[in-house]
Image (tube, rainbow, N blue to C red):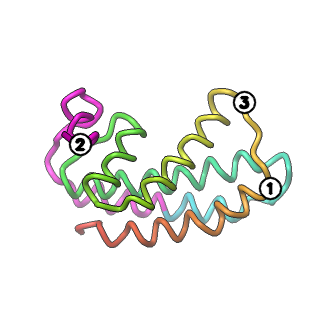
Amino acid sequence: MTRFKQSIEQGYVKVVPSDRIKAKSLVKSADEAVYSAKKIPFEISTLKSIIRELYEGLRQCCEAIGCTYGYKFLSHEAITYFIEDGLKEQKISAKFDRYRKIRNGINYYGDDVSEETIKEALAEIPELIAQLKKHIKI
């Protein structure tokens, strides 16, 4: 059994009717989050805000895909499994999980993030979103 199927059985993912209207709205929100992240001044004091917005855009894009497939994610980790098992995108799944852990470290443990990580995320996350958008069925 895949980890994604286990996530469904354990209640971390709900099977719901496909919702293209919600998916379109989430894609728009994802694009706006990335746009906003790029507008935040690149300063030591704003690095955490930049990565939070970038991750939010990436997550919303994944939520949009889930909407079109009939899934509602109740766990960000389950999104990782969906990307890997459902979409068959192992590399994107690993990168999503990396950014999920960075964001969790910032939000829940007060971790700092390096300028290099932010520069990488500013380049990589919009590309990940572009790659994932091919899975959106709207």
Residue 7 included in the magenta stretch of the image? yes
Residue under label 1, please give it.
Answer: 115
Element class at badge 3: loop
Tag 2–tag 3 contact (CB < 8 Å):
no
* Residue in the picture at 27% in, 34% down: 7
**Precedes in sequence: disc 1 or disc 2:** 2
Write down the quadrant of residue 133 in the picture: bottom left
Quarter the C terminus occupies: bottom left
On the image, the x and y values in percent for residue 94 come to 47, 53
Considering depth in this image, is 44 or 124 the residue closer to the camera? 124
Q: Is residue 103 left or right of residue 119?
A: left
**Does residue 8 lie above or below 117 as drawn?**
above
* Residue in the picture at 54% in, 68% down: 126
**Precedes in sequence: disc 3 or disc 1:** 3
**Does residue 71 lie above or below 34 as drawn?**
above
Element class at badge 2: loop
Residue under label 2, please give it.
Answer: 2
Question: Which secondary structure type mostly characterizes the magenta part of the structure?
Answer: helix
**Precedes in sequence: disc 2 or disc 3:** 2
Quarter the N terminus occupies: top left
Residue located farthest toward the front when viewing the structure as drawn: 1
Number of residues whose C-alpha sits closer than 10 Å to that of mark 1, classed few (under 14), some (14–19) or many (20 or more): some
What's the CA distance linking mark 2 and mark 3? 32 Å
Considering depth in this image, is 28 or 54 the residue closer to the camera? 54
Residue under label 3, please give it.
Answer: 110
Which stretch appears magenta?
Answer: 1-30
